[in-house]
Amino acid sequence: MTSTLHTNILGIDFENPFLLASAPPTALVESIDKAFGMGWGGAVLKTITPDDLEMNEASPRYAVLTDKKRIIGFQNIELLSHQTIKYWCEGIKYLKHKHPSKIIIASIMSPVDKTAWQTLVKTLNDTPADAFELNFSCPHGMPEKGIGMAIGTDAEVSAQITGWVKEVAQKPVFVKLSPNVTNIAAIGQAVEKAGADGLAAINTVQGFMGIDLNTLRPVLNVNRKTTFGGCSGPIVRPIGLRCVAQLRQTSKLPILGQGGISTWEDAAQYIAAGADAVQICTEVMLNGYKIIGPLLKGLHDYLDAKGFADINALKNKAVELLTTHKALQKTPPS
């Protein structure tokens, strides 16, 4: 039996389920062009904002956590795309013309203002992007402006903005949710009720990477100061899997899963937990776009070995095994 990695989500044909997440690897058209040439199925653009939204970066803005052998965690305090809306409109057209089979999802963020959100959406409607991803979940910098995670931790505001976007969007709308909440399923249900076509989870987990005990300064040291930032990499995978599974238990919407995916095995676990496709960032930053080769081969070989025709045969396999602690079989105390 020969399996296929092709899948269809909301009427959109994905040649494979591996997408670049909205992050530094999708900050430039040239980088996405290179990645598409290597085999990536699609890309979520680094978040596009109104041109007048001020963004001033701190430096340095990255830090890592190691287990003495490899990097297991990554923290960043980087903000959103610094490119103009015009740059992205032209870039999307260029990429789609050169790579018509690749999926392009426009990640967007705006202040909590109906006109601002709808103006941004209307402008991008005129591009050949396949879908929108609403960034309600950036955990640093933007919440101080009342956006990013400040939106995604409030079910009412998340639903309101989703409704504004759906009023004018001519493409499917995914909402990217934050893990930095008590109940991600409740936020997912709120945006689904407001009209979201799909969900994306997770964005980075807010964290504090650590302290250098020799200098007693933070590992992410900006002139001796630091701030809480977004953590990613293998350390967050259990959180991402949990969030995707919780969303799948309460929703039938398509889910783009992400968080700590480094290998095809990680991707397969996300699909078994309910994801329809996956997004990857940190592993690309650490090892380059070339990781797509082993990802494609590994997942394809796994599906063949299991006798699965496609990833849909794998999807949700783990969800039916999830239950409450109360429902678990209990062993007598020894």
Image (tube, helix red, strand yellow):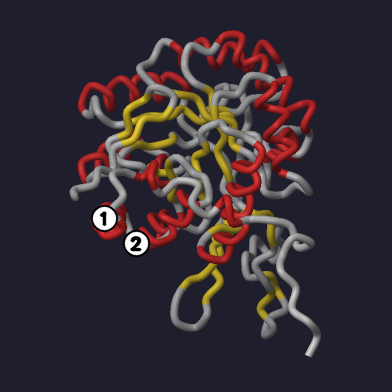
Q: Is residue 119 left or right of residue 276?
A: right
| Residue behind mark 2 | 287
* The quarter of the displayed image where residue 152 is located: top right
Q: Residue at x 57, y 34 (%)?
A: 199
Residue 283 at x, y = what percent?
A: 41, 59
The kind of secondary structure element at disc 2 is helix
* The quarter of the displayed image where residue 147 is located: top right
Q: Is residue 282 visible?
A: yes
Q: Residue at x 28, y 45 (%)?
A: 309
Residue 106 at x, y = what percent?
A: 46, 27
Q: Identity of the amino acid at label 2?
A: Asn
Residue 247 at x, y = what percent?
A: 63, 42
The kind of secondary structure element at disc 1 is helix
Please tell me whether residue 107 is drawn above or below residue 241 in the rendered image.
above
Q: Are marks 2 and 1 in contact (CB under 8 Å)?
A: yes
Closer to the camera in the image, 118 or 101 = 101
Judged from this view, the residue extending furthest toward the bottom is 334
Q: Residue at x 51, y 61 (%)?
A: 233
